[in-house]
Amino acid sequence: STRSELESGKSGEEIALELIQNLMDQGVRTVYLVPPIFRGGRRDYDSARRVIESARRLAS
């Protein structure tokens, strides 16, 4: 599960990229990525940007 992967030390970015790669392998070409949202509503837009940039490299 995603929770166990996170607890074992895998980064959320790695997990997101694996999921995106699986979707791409199934023919999905677009996704809507929501940045991580922390308590208090703070969002990690830098993390989302890194995932998007990496996913674009996977697609090319």
Image (spheres, rainbow, N blue to C red):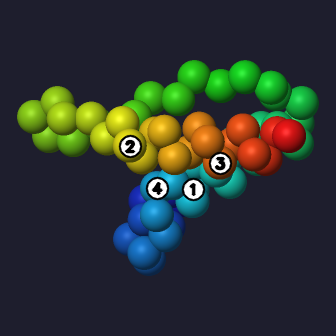
In the displayed structure, does residue 29 sit left or right of residue 54? right
Q: Position of residue 22 (x, y in %)?
A: 78, 46
Q: Residue at x 56, y 45 (%)?
A: 51
* Circle 1 SS class: helix
Placement of 47 over or under 52, stated as above or below: below
* Residue 43 vs residue 4, the one in the foreground: 43
Mark before the other along the chain sequence, 1 or 3: 1
Quarter holding residue 41 = top left
Q: Are marks 1 and 3 in contact (CB under 8 Å)?
A: no
Q: Amino acid at mark 1?
A: Ile
Q: Are marks 3 and 4 in contact (CB under 8 Å)?
A: no
Which residue is located at x 82 percent, y 39 percent? 59
* Image location of residue 11, percent across then percent down: 46, 64
Residues at badges 1 and 4 in contact (C-beta under 8 Å)?
yes
Question: Residue 12 shows which numbered tag?
Answer: 4
Q: Quadrant of the C terminus?
A: top right
Label 3 sits on a secondary structure element that is helix
Label 1 Cα neighbours within 10 Å, binned few <14 / some 14-19 / many ≥20:
some
On screen, residue 55 versus residue 52, left or right, reads: right
Answer few, some or many: residues within 10 Å of disc 2's Cα (few below 14, many 20 plus, some between 14 and 19).
Answer: few
Q: CA distance from mark 1 to mark 3?
A: 12 Å
In percent of width and height, residue 57 lies at 75, 45
Mark 4 or 2: the one toward you: 2
Examine the rendering and report whether any part of residue 12 can be seen.
yes
Label 1 to label 4: alpha-carbon separation? 5 Å
Quarter-of-image position of residue 9? bottom left
Q: Which residue is mark 1?
A: 15
